[in-house]
Amino acid sequence: MSFILVTGSAGFIGSHVSKKLLNNGRDVIGIDNLNDYYDVKLKKDRLKDIKAVNTSSKFIFYNADISDLDALQQIFAKHKIESIINLAAQAGVRHSIINPHSYVNSNIVGFTNILEISRHEGVNHLTYASTSSIYGADRNYPFNESRGSNHPVQFYAATKKANEVMAHSYSHLYELPTSGLRFFTVYGPWGRPDMALFIFTKLILENKPIPIFNNGMHKRDFTYIDDLVDAVIKIHENPPKKNDLYDHTAEDPSQSSAPYRIINIGSNNPINLSEYIECIESTLGMKAIKKLEPMQDGDVETTFADIEKLKQLTEFNVTPIEFGIKKFVSWYRNYYHV
């Protein structure tokens, strides 16, 4: 029996990926350190939701941290693991300004361990989460993977940029197939409490003011969780191959002669924050009390994904924002008995 290892399996995206793999008939090992960056009960309930999947596929969970190489080695010694989807990371863009060391531990030390275990255990594909935050101060819309992304505006994005170049070194040296996926503002059921949709829904239902940063001028390329998960798994099932014909004079950081690639996953349709809030209000049947705030440190005005490469690799579906918000609100009301 061979497994796919999903790190961060108690997280928002990791739990959805684990469930989808199980429903697709794949056996999954999940690991997560269940840290208290946000409500641990929510993470444990996601794990219960995974284990409730009605399938003959097997799910085994380990409470472990990817920064602990010994723990990873012990897991690999017990199980045959063919590939890895690495979604474990210290989350939160603005939190990286407050506590950068936690990002080094998870996103740098932990990712190094994932690369090393992949190399030594002969993993056939390492797919890992990167982020749209990498584009940082860039203003050349839509964001295309083939252009440089050398101006991150907070430390979280800098660690993810480091992951991409670290992965390339292993792809080049050891022919380890790696796919880095730049996620654009993922939302949906089981989302994180520090994300805008969760915060807005909670505060509107409580008749409390919602903070609207940059005076509501933000635009975000929102990506519904089911669309993203489908793309992650399809990409993971088709590892990149070595390309000896690659033109080394091309300045394209998203690919090379190595079995390596970087891919955006977004909707290619930025939504103004005010429109997003109106949709939440409509779904809840309540008006928000709005508190306009200035731009936060480390934030950007607009994210906008070029997804031509994604569409070449998958039949990518884009869920309408109205449907996605309704699905989240329905989950939120049910989970919190509102």
Image: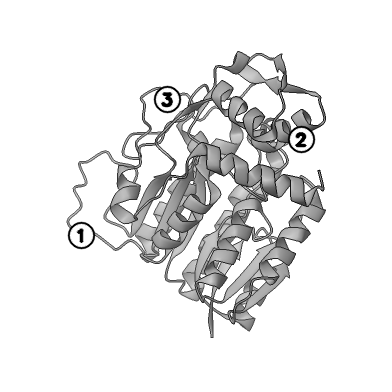
- Report the amino acid beneath label 2: Lys
Question: What residue sits right under mark 3 in the picture?
Answer: 138
Q: Position of residue 127 (x, y in %)?
A: 47, 59
* Residue 99: quarter of image: top right
Residue density around tag 3, few if under 14, some if 14–19, many if 20 or more, within 10 Å: some
User: Are the residues tagged 3 and 1 within 8 Å (C-beta)?
Assistant: no
Residue type pointed to by label 3: Asp
Alpha carbons under labels 3 and 1: distance apart: 31 Å
Which numbered disc, 2 or 1, marks the residue that appears first in the sequence? 2
Q: Disc 2 and disc 1: Cα gap in Å?
A: 52 Å
Report helix, strand or loop for mark 1.
Answer: loop
Q: Identify which residue is drawn at 40% across, 64% down.
A: 176
- For label 2, the crowd category at 10 Å Cα-Cα, with few meaning under 14, some 14 to 19 and many 20 or more, is some
Mark 1: amino acid: Asp
| x 63%, y 30%: residue | 282
- Label 2 sits on residue: 202
> Can see residue 103?
no
